[in-house]
Amino acid sequence: MPWYELESADDPRLDELAKQYHLHPLHIEDSRSQYESVKVDTAPHYTFAVFKPVHLESGMPAFSTIDIFAGKDFFITIAEPGCPATSEALARARREGCDDKPGKLLYLILDTIVDLYFPAIDQFDDRIDELEDSVVGSPSPEILQSVFGIKRELIELRRVLVNTRDASLQLQRDPGSIIDAEHQLYIRDTYDHVARLLDSVETQRDLLNNTLDIYLSSVANRTNEVMKVLTILGTIALPALAISGIYGMNLKGLPFEASTHGALYVGGFTVFCTVLLLAILRKFRWL
Amino acid sequence: MPWYELESADDPRLDELAKQYHLHPLHIEDSRSQYESVKVDTAPHYTFAVFKPVHLESGMPAFSTIDIFAGKDFFITIAEPGCPATSEALARARREGCDDKPGKLLYLILDTIVDLYFPAIDQFDDRIDELEDSVVGSPSPEILQSVFGIKRELIELRRVLVNTRDASLQLQRDPGSIIDAEHQLYIRDTYDHVARLLDSVETQRDLLNNTLDIYLSSVANRTNEVMKVLTILGTIALPALAISGIYGMNLKGLPFEASTHGALYVGGFTVFCTVLLLAILRKFRWL
Amino acid sequence: MPWYELESADDPRLDELAKQYHLHPLHIEDSRSQYESVKVDTAPHYTFAVFKPVHLESGMPAFSTIDIFAGKDFFITIAEPGCPATSEALARARREGCDDKPGKLLYLILDTIVDLYFPAIDQFDDRIDELEDSVVGSPSPEILQSVFGIKRELIELRRVLVNTRDASLQLQRDPGSIIDAEHQLYIRDTYDHVARLLDSVETQRDLLNNTLDIYLSSVANRTNEVMKVLTILGTIALPALAISGIYGMNLKGLPFEASTHGALYVGGFTVFCTVLLLAILRKFRWL
Amino acid sequence: MPWYELESADDPRLDELAKQYHLHPLHIEDSRSQYESVKVDTAPHYTFAVFKPVHLESGMPAFSTIDIFAGKDFFITIAEPGCPATSEALARARREGCDDKPGKLLYLILDTIVDLYFPAIDQFDDRIDELEDSVVGSPSPEILQSVFGIKRELIELRRVLVNTRDASLQLQRDPGSIIDAEHQLYIRDTYDHVARLLDSVETQRDLLNNTLDIYLSSVANRTNEVMKVLTILGTIALPALAISGIYGMNLKGLPFEASTHGALYVGGFTVFCTVLLLAILRKFRWL
Amino acid sequence: MPWYELESADDPRLDELAKQYHLHPLHIEDSRSQYESVKVDTAPHYTFAVFKPVHLESGMPAFSTIDIFAGKDFFITIAEPGCPATSEALARARREGCDDKPGKLLYLILDTIVDLYFPAIDQFDDRIDELEDSVVGSPSPEILQSVFGIKRELIELRRVLVNTRDASLQLQRDPGSIIDAEHQLYIRDTYDHVARLLDSVETQRDLLNNTLDIYLSSVANRTNEVMKVLTILGTIALPALAISGIYGMNLKGLPFEASTHGALYVGGFTVFCTVLLLAILRKFRWL
């Protein structure tokens, strides 16, 4: 069975293959579009599939695209070289399935792609844990930006995974599916993996929302603490300023005015007022 | 096959056509109503469809309306001139489908309309990115108003897209659909496009909600920072004011009162107190 | 065909009619209950329907209730006089449908009632727009109370509309429906109207939630601004108070103490310190 | 037909009845468990039902449990005495249905229990209205605790109602249901009542969430107002303190130093500065 | 019937058993994977099940894994020793079901595992109650961390319970289920238990969200109170500082300047101003 491996959908050989195997113009158009999303489309005599393998580029998940035309007696893949996930999927298909039917090849590629989502998602777990610790320790706007950055990537990942789940469900349920009965169990297993990945992404979204709540409540709490410090400073200052102000007035008739230890008496009274004020505030639980 | 292109539903010719082709009074009423929403309605001998082409007016998506009556052997379109999206859809239908059946014409118009949603939605991506950057840099109420403005437009767009998706689903599923088996694959493709557009709109809503969260947390953070500055100012002021106040009192018995370098000694003590206070606050992580 | 128009469910004539037409005791009980909600109930030889016409009372939607027993050869309506929407629905039924079957009458009443929801909902659009503008301009608790008041009315409206949608769906789907095939298209049209009304209510709820977010962020922003003003005041005050306090001390050894232009020099130094402090704060973007 | 009324599931008579009527051990176990929830379970020759009647204990809804085994020719109820709702349900069943089939008895008990939910839920309406008024008037943490208390009770109530709705749906739909065709209409009516109760609980939850939003925005608003007062105080204080401080300095060269009306001139200047400052702040809408 | 109890999936005996009983390689792979989640998979001649028994480790729920291969005439369990929940489940299966069919054994194990979730979930109730009380009394970031910690555990628990519910549903519905008709009632009972557990977890999540809202509103309220204290301090300080500052000026022309009881008069005036100011603020409800 011939397997055509193209590196670009703009390859003129695709047009020849399209003519030879009666590939639908819409599918050719799709494979050349920039906006492809993951899907499986069953045409009368072949299956058209688009998957999005993922690999990590400096810690961020990066998606590439692979288009597959799987007929009864031909197999066409279109994938840009350079994505390690795509390469691994194609290598495994070549190694394990090249004597097999196109259905098996399709399964092998999908299964490898799905398995390679796991490390991409697992690394988020560590980053979310780190962020959560940082937020509790010292909430800063930079951390928040990281939180929103991850949230954005998860939104993207979730979208790809939902489409991949639907695609594997279609391979399972579609009566004209290219996957024969013998391999249905394998596809169901792949479906289970995607479902578990989606579970993880949902959990991570919940955890990120927690982190945001922690951030907001930490900042609210810190503002509250700073306010208290300010109020304590004000409480300490009030008697000192008021009393010293009063004794600074150019007026007559103040007590201890002429006493040699006047400063001592007045100082003692000031300290007494301060302590009393702090005690009152604490008693009414205002501080 | 005759194709009647009307420019307004108030055109008296519509009444003649209604009589000639037995168009249902409810559909005529609908096409003349202000409150039309996107839909496909299958009458026994024709299909009535309402679509909402979109074009950009100074960066804002603007909707117009096109009504279509597609019978077995007639095709009526009612569309106000002036909307570029409508014009393009009609032009493409005339160019590619005018020898074809009404079902093909209907598909061509719907497909063009859907394709023209893409640029309208893509431009939001840029605006949301911009807003997010602005919010992090300098959160201001004006930015927030833009956020809510876009949110409002997305609510509107989403509503139109949901109805368009349901309409294309009905063209696909309805047993009496005007789209024949041969073109079902095309309609399914259109349906996929609408689904992808809806995905994008959902993602954009999520991103806008992120932006709002960033705004609120930035403001909370800034309030917190301003509070800290105020507290630091208070901390610096407290010893200077209290000590200078004390030495301003018209009392006797203060240390260094008569010393020639009294100001120096007291000034040094004040600086010492200030530094001590700041150190204490920092130690307890209040600042 | 006789049409009995009762003005109250407590009318003893209802008991006679119940006996004559074998109306189910549960339906009689329902029509006499205070807690009726919109519904359609198909009994073997007649259909029992409850609708909730709406009219505006000083800008607020007010609901009344109409009960309908529509048999093959009789039609009973129970509606308190005084509600303009009910009167209009009955008048239209009398005018357009009185020679027709009860199914037509039922449709005419339901259709009029649904059409009269539109103005009730449209007026919310204006009020929400107004509120949004007010909130941005000057957020005040009174505006918030209006927001929550409208939210409350929308919750109520939504409940009635959801039940009305379910009722019209049942009239469409129920195999024993009183609406014959010929009028199914009309009922579907009514159903579409209710669905569109529900869409509007959902949109309005979204917009109200936006308004709440705008309110909260406006208040947060204003608190932030007030804090800044306070901090600027503090920054301006600090050098003036500290330096004037120092020169108010009864101590010797301060510079310019004896200079004839001492006040000028010290004043200049104070202004210099203030400007420097403001510049520092601005540089670190604390203000 | 015998009706066995037990007052406790630990009554040894239950074991005898279980043997006599072949009651399933799981149902006996269930009726003796503490964790029972509302359900209907159809065994081959009888129906096992658990309901949760509610009554008000000092304004709070309190639940009790009633277990029912309804066979073709026997009826067993297990209910602790002391709950007024249970007593009323049993009394009505005895009064109206004791010559009837077990299905009728079961319906009568369920219907009475459901009707008694209405007053329990209606009293929440009043309490929520009261809370909302209090929150607008004077937001305090105590009110918030009441809000959360009611929320908690609604969560509980909702859970019981959802299960009751599912149970009555099962009595309606189950082909082996003990409720015969003649009484189906009654059970559907009960189902409608439960659905309406659930609607009310949902609405009350929405209203409680509104109350929480009102609380938070009221507090935010009050903080904002207090800040403004503080800033106004600061604005009034600033010129007085700065200018009086300057004139308190032991320096030469200040204007009006020697004037006999110096205090008047300087006082006037201070008032002028204060008014000017307040005007500036107001102009820039900072206050 | 042989029952093979393995303690690790890496046991080489598993490979022999796989060969002997034709266990599917995917299931063997699953049982050796780290990422297993709860599921039931029906192969042609046996059922593969994965469950997650839970036990409490210092108050935290800890999960272990048990894999089961239940054929017509063999039963294989793979479970690490050390988890008390697993041990109890296996002990009960040995005690009550060892002469029975594999279906009964499977049910006994699942039922025990599910019953042991109850204490794990009940202990959260107490912890949430405690947290809620603490939050009202004294909101602190540590409490919030506990809240988020429990939230995290509930997310985990919920995921396991949802999968367990799906697994027990499959044992009930699957036409090729290993559970025979006689035991269906038992499995349905287990399903009901899982559903009730999920209900509890949902309720606990709601309550935790309440706790978070209480926290945020408590902090907002406290900030508001601290602000008021600060404003009261400022209000008390203002007249004292302003008036004493004025009388500290080296100027002539102030009233009571030369009076022997000047300090008394001015002091009285200061107190009067303070009281007046406080009264004004209270009147306008600013404090």
Image (cartoon, coloured by chain):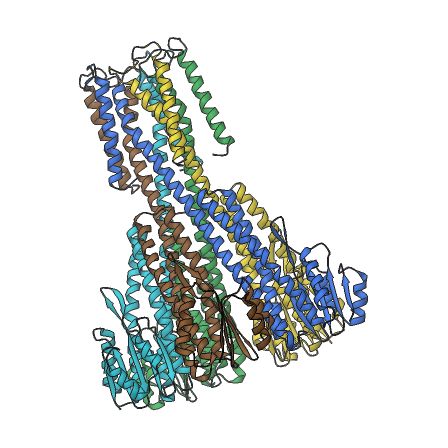
Chain colours: A brown, B blue, C yellow, D green, E cyan
Q: Horizontal and vertical percent for residue A274? A: 25, 32
Residue sitting at x 55%, y 53%: B124
State which quarter of the image contains the C terminus of chain C. Answer: top left
Residue C165 visible (yes or no):
no
Residue C128 visible (yes or no):
yes
Reply above or below: E234 against C62. Answer: above
Q: Horizontal and vertical percent for residue E17? A: 27, 86
Which corner quadrant of the image does residue E99 belong to?
bottom left
- A166 and C215: which one is in front? A166
State which quarter of the image contains the N terminus of chain C. Answer: bottom right
Q: Is residue A254 left or right of residue E169?
A: left
- C53 and A6: which one is in front? A6
Q: Horizontal and vertical percent for residue E33? A: 31, 73
Residue sitting at x 40%, y 14%: D263
Number of dots carrying numbers: 0
Reply above or below: E108 against A59. Answer: below
- A265 and B195: which one is in front? B195
Reply above or below: E101 against A213. Answer: below
Which corner quadrant of the image does residue B36 belong to?
bottom right
